[in-house]
Image (spheres, rainbow, N blue to C red):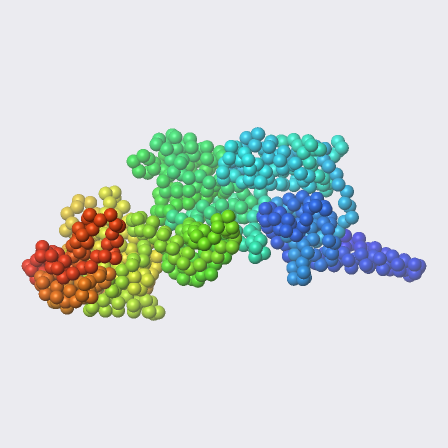
Amino acid sequence: MNSLYFYINFLRELTKILMKRNFNYILLYTFVQFVFFKLKTLIDTEFNWNILSDFALKNLIRRFYNEKNYYVDRNSCLLASVQYFKAPIPTWFYICSKFSLKKYKVLIIPKIQKDNVDTNNIFVSETMKYNIENALHCTIDKCFLLPTKDNSIKFATVVKVSMISNPYESTDNLIRVLLENYFSEPRFLKKNDLFGINIKEYMLDQMYLYINPLMSIIYFKVNSIIINDKDCTVNDISYILFGETTVIQEPNIHTYLPQKHFDYNQIEEKHIELYPPNLATLLEHLEHCILPFIKHDIQLSINPIFLIKGSQGSNKRKLIQILAEKIGLNFLNIDFAEVQALTSAQTEAKLRIVLHNAEQCMPCMLCLNNIEVFGKNSEGQKDERVISTFSNEINLLYNKHLKFPIIIIATTNESDIPSELNRIFIETIHLEHLNQKKRTNLISWLLMKQNLDYQVNLSKISGICSDFRYSDLLILILNAVKFRCKDKCRNFNAKNLKLFNLVLLQEDFDKAYEYMQSIYTDCKGTPHIPKVYWEDIGGLINLKHEITRRIQLPLMNTLEFGQSGLLLYGPPGTGKTLLAKAVATEFQLHFLSVKGSEMLNMYVGQSEKNVRQVFERARAAVPCIIFFDELDSLAPNRGRSGDSGGVMDRVVSQLLAEMDGLDYSNNIFIIGATNRPDLIDPALLRPGRFDKLLYVGIHCDRDSQFNVLKALTRKFKFRENGKELEKFVSQLPNHTTGADLYSVCSNAWLNAARKILNSYQNSSKDVKLNEYVVVELEDFSKAAYDLIPSVSKQEAEKYKRMEIELSSVS
């Protein structure tokens, strides 16, 4: 372009000289000045290039243009609203580089606007962007538009194409049918152009017979075009039509793919990022690490092998796939659980096949999932032979001086992997747990990507889903859609149901959350918010006040003082677990219940790992309560456990280390429960750990027993409106626990139910027990007749002495 400016300036100066001798040259000077002004206007015009997927651009063109009057190849055109482009029909333009004389002919369709808000807006597909930049050797923001009147249409006689190598297997018949269907309409292409064929669009009736379900688009490259026995140059463009043009397929080639940029929301007419906002920083960091290995002018003697660590469901594989699409690489996904075999020889053979497949589809990004299972034999021990083979095969691969890059990224859910594997990776990237703000942005992105309208408070939803990851939040939204569709189907005819009119409400997300919690609570160690309220617990007024004070003040604390733990001790059946659940419910804290026996494992180091995982889950689910039930079995006195390997001593040490690591975590609370506090290691009872011991005793006085009975019978129907309880309390033993009173109440209700069933025994009517069962004093008396207190007087006195001894500690 600088040379063009030079010629125009030279012509202007020459015209000035000639004007001195002949004034007739003033007309030529005026014309040259006009051409220069117009050209400068074209070059200086700034365009807003909107890059869309091929599918999104075709749908957008269909909205703004009717093809009945003028045929348009929607795969090879642009949609634009240009200030100096006023033609109402598609018009041919040259896209010219500002740095050279290269040009690319393209058909531009006018985007008719009622106002001029989107002036100089150009919509281009990802494939067209790739072809333009490949032809002009510059980015599209360094180009300008030049109108042309060359509307001649030429049909190619012969075209030779090659398929771009990809990770999936495809038969010759599949490729033949795809090309025939694609070129059944005229396609506007030139030499060295790339074009992609969507299998679902051009082979929908046979796609499940031939292809891998993960393969959606196959890319081809135009190697040469022949028109009337004459080879075309890169500037010659023609139409290719099956029947008029002979399509010849040549061997597969390796090249970069069109880069993906944005998705386009056609309803709201705005761009959507390919990736959620919480992955932006990680993607940028990982992209900067990979780019030096892709640039041809940089030669590094380092193997591009990276490791990504993150919890299950944190979107590690999706992160790598998005990065591969953004850079323009093939994505090959391999699970090491499938590579690992019974013998080392079989594992090595599968590993060589994986690396060979990656080499066949380069440029490639190879994703190795679950690398923690790799390099282990059938007994779970480290297999040094396989790890050594993996390292050697990678070195052999990169010593071949490949023309295109192969980037290897491994993923793992484990925090620790063998050191021999770890030294292979040049960088390790950690996926941290999402905080509430990131979860809110992620939910908003998922809803926008699926074109879903909503009328909910996203911050509230992300607050209750504190332990949810990417996959969990996606399932939450899908379940919310399911419940909204069910509600719509009840009110409307299914034939008239339109999904795009769905508006998600708060109740849909509440139902979806409860449904997912009902599934997740079946999993071991899953945090959840229980549904136990203060009114479900009778008596224990002082304990309620003390626990509330211990939990509420740290939540309000902004000075980052670490909070202490609570240890509830007392006889069995006194409501220690129920108290902890009620605290979690009242303060809307996640509740992570852990029994001491569940943490122990027969394998060396696994018990300590289980302790670490409990605290990791708690950090992911803040605010959270960790409740250690049967703490005496998990943390006995060190040196007295009697096991030869010292397992319990290591578990106690790990538990102490994790508790000390929560000094400044004001949203994680630890509550323990035990029947034998004298067996717990004394180090757990020092300040900063379980430094507050609360005794949960039996109910000795009539008032506390009455309060417990009142709480347990809240949903009962009485004959005398509850006055039966006041009369019944005097019949109870002096020493009863909450479990004893619960047994009395349940047996009393069963006694009343039996009377109802006996009276309806010979009747054919359906009996609704909840409506007819009325509990009387007689039922309670009968239930209490056989009651034997679970705690004897001697045991009660022992616990009383223990309370006095431990009161000085707390």
674, above or below 367, in the image: below
Question: Which of 252/622 is in front?
Answer: 622
Residue pictured at 39% horizontal, 54% vertical: 512
**Which x, y percent locates residue 613?**
31, 51
Q: In the image as oriented, which residue stretches furthest toward the left? A: 794
The quarter in which the C terminus is drawn is bottom left
Q: Is residue 50 left or right of residue 360?
A: right
Toward the front, the furthest residue is 763
Residue drawn where x is 65% and y is 36% of the image:
183
Q: Can see residue 91?
A: yes
Q: Quadrant of residue 18?
A: bottom right
Residue appearing at x 40%, y 51% in the figure = 472
Give 181 or 320, whichever is nearer the viewer.
Answer: 181
Q: Is residue 77 left or right of residue 410?
A: right
User: Residue 675 location, x and y as percent?
Assistant: 15, 57
Q: Is residue 803 above or below residue 320?
A: below
The residue shown at (84%, 57%) is 31
Quadrant in the rendering for residue 720: bottom left
